Image: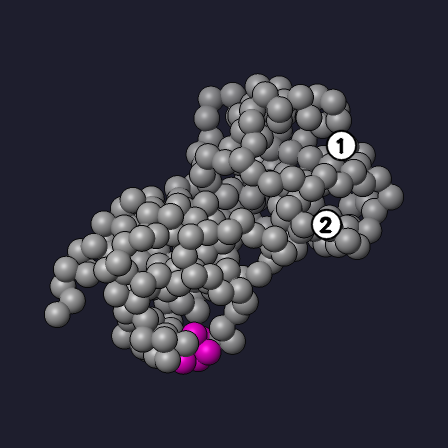
Amino acid sequence: MRILILGGTTEASTLARLLAGRTEFSPLLSMAGRTSDPRPLPIPTRIGGFGGVQGLVRFLTQERIEAVLDATHPFAAVMSRNAAEACVIARVPLLALRRPSWTVQAGDLWIEVSSMEEAVDALGDESRRVFLTVGRLELPPFAAAPQHTYLVRTIEPIGDALPVANLIAIQDRAPFDEVAERSLMERERVEVVVTKNSGGTVTYPKIAAARALGLPVIIVARPEKPRDVEEVASAEAALEWLERRHGRTP
């Protein structure tokens, strides 16, 4: 059974490892290519886009894909929409592997916003020390508020994505540890955390650390994703879905 996994998440990597060595499946993992040195995985991997909906339709047809798993990042809304449309056109079954959002807990001081621009506004006019963990591509809007000191953590170098005077850049990759996150925030005298509601466990320690320190968190809500797509919340559930579909194959 030929499978295309649209990846870039911990869940996609877990599914790839679960499928490795399963001779009844022939999986291909597709990565967007935003990380220059992705961690190697034990199944064939391609890097790069497809060229929109029609490009993806051609790929599905040419590669004889029999099922698609959308395990993209919760904020990869365009890719999810393209996958949903392409799978309808190509008549290929689609499953979305979507991790649950984080939810506010007792002690959390969340300010929920719907965009990066709203996150910038929520910082206010007074200078603050901001721990910014929204990803390299989401940094430019914060240049509109150069009065703040930004502690920016990304996987890739940020280059000139945030041209402000007071900037501390850290390159690091999840998973993170709550004790280490608390130590970082205390050492850098962080006053507010800005992040996306990515969900999952590997980056949640910053949320727990902010709660423990009594820091406000400006959290950007997820974009809307296609609703008429079957979805599961774990790689194990996705594997069960694939096994059921394989069982229907003549």
Between the C-alphas of marks 2 and 1, the distance is 20 Å
The three-letter amino acid code for the residue at tag 2 is Pro
Q: Nearer the viewer, residue 124 or 12?
A: 12
The answer to if 60 sits in the magenta stretch is no
Task: Give the position of the C terminus as an image quadrant.
Answer: bottom left
Which is more N-terminal, label 1 or label 2? Answer: 1
Residue 246 is at least partly visible in this image: yes
Query: Is 111 drawn above or below residue 16 in the view shown?
Result: above
Return the residue nearer the eye: 147 or 238.
Answer: 238
At a point 73% along the width and 50% down the height, the residue shown is: 158
Residue 54 part of the magenta segment: yes
Q: Residues within 10 Å of mark 1 (few under 14, many from 20)?
A: many
Which residue position is annotated with label 2?
A: 157
State which region is magenta.
53-58
The residue tagged 1 is 129
Seen in the image, is 242 located left or right of residue 181? left
